[in-house]
Image (tube, rainbow, N blue to C red):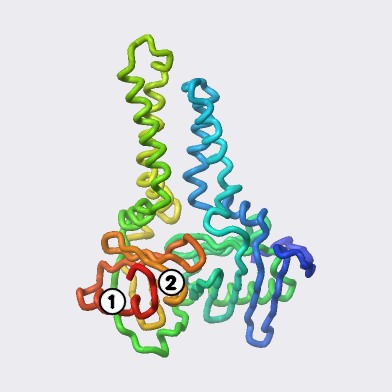
Amino acid sequence: MAWFAKSRYEIRRRTHRYSAVVSDVGSESGSVHLQYELRPDERMLFVLRFGRMYRVLGPIGAALIGVVALQLAPDWIWLLLPLGIALAVSFLWLPFATRFGSTPITFDAAADGLTIASGGASSSLSWGTIRSIRRVGGALAIEVEPAGTFAVPVRVFRHQEQRTFEALAAANLGAESAPSQLDVEPILIRCRSDIRFLDTVLVLALRPMMLAPLVLGGILIAAGVSELLAPASDPFKSITLPLIVIGVVFVTLPLWGAAWRVYLGGGTGAMGAPYEIEIGALGYRARLRNADSWHPWDSFESMRRVGSVYAFRVRGSKAEVVLSARGFSPADQNTLQEVLRASGIKGA
């Protein structure tokens, strides 16, 4: 496979917590089992290369630094320069914004698909969920449908694991289904649903963390309006327009920033296709064309609802998994609420 070309490395077992790697190759069964932790430099590099949030914050930071460099708001350099630098280099702190330190990751690859577990959350994906696997620097970038990228450091693979994983990918990439626990438990809800572009944008925009840009934008707009109403002799009169413009940018950031993130993740076309939902007492399964994923309820600690979309908070993280209820009947929604309460998910 091209993404393994020219790769030569050695894994050394060390006591350092960020370098520990435990691996096992099932040569007879054709499977790979990895347990590892991402080093701080890897977490930052992966956000820089693959993070959609950084693709929003980075350009904003660069724009603010440009405003300072062009002397468009000289009296506000004390605010714009530190803020611009913080956003431009946000790939350095974004990996640590959701959880301090590194969370152990378990990665399993077999003929029936991939299983990724971290921080109490587990996701089982069929090979049909994988759009592509490519080598990017020191990582394997695994792109999944309908959107998203999961990066695995190349250093955690040993020579035999490279060949086993390569053979699994070559033989199974594009396979249609993967078994899940729903194959052996009663299915309580089975229906077709869809999640729309605006649904995902609203879920991302209407989060508590988005209060920060709203507050900052409101302060800048208020300062700009106060200068607009000030006498012509006021020395800060010249910065009225820059303050208002920058304030509007931050006030609207939750919406346009979320829209840009969703677009980068696959665009509006990735959101329109209907998918099949199967819900049981242990979790739910979502199938989109040849993509198949399983999410156990015990992977989530809380939930919130935005319109017809349920957003589940992954245990031990601020990441969320969304489930659209557009195709649910009233009886289905009542059943789902009962399942979520029985699973102990907060907010249900």
Q: Quadrant of residue 187?
A: bottom left
**Taking the image as drawn, is residue 2 in sight?**
no
In the visual, does 97 lie left or right of 300?
right
Q: Residues within 10 Å of mark 1 (few under 14, many from 20)?
A: some
Q: In the rendered view, would you say 13 is above or below 98? A: below
Looking at the rendered structure, which numbered label has been put on residue 115? none
What residue is at 47 percent from the left and 61 percent from the top?
319
Q: Earlier in the sequence, mark 1 or mark 2?
A: 1
Q: Secondary structure at mark 2?
A: strand
Instruction: Return the residue at label 1.
Output: 191
Q: Quadrant of the C terminus?
A: bottom left
Label 2: which residue? 291
Crowd tier of the residue under label 2, counting other residues whose Cα lies within 10 Å: few below 14, some 14–19, many 20 or above: many
Count of marks, rendered view: 2
Look at 35% across and 89% down and name the residue there. Answer: 186
- Which SS class for mark 1? strand
Residue 126: x and y in percent read: 49, 75
Amino acid tagged 1: Cys
Locate the N terminus and report the quarter of the image it occupies: bottom right
The answer for how far apart the CA atoms under marks 1 and 2 are is 16 Å
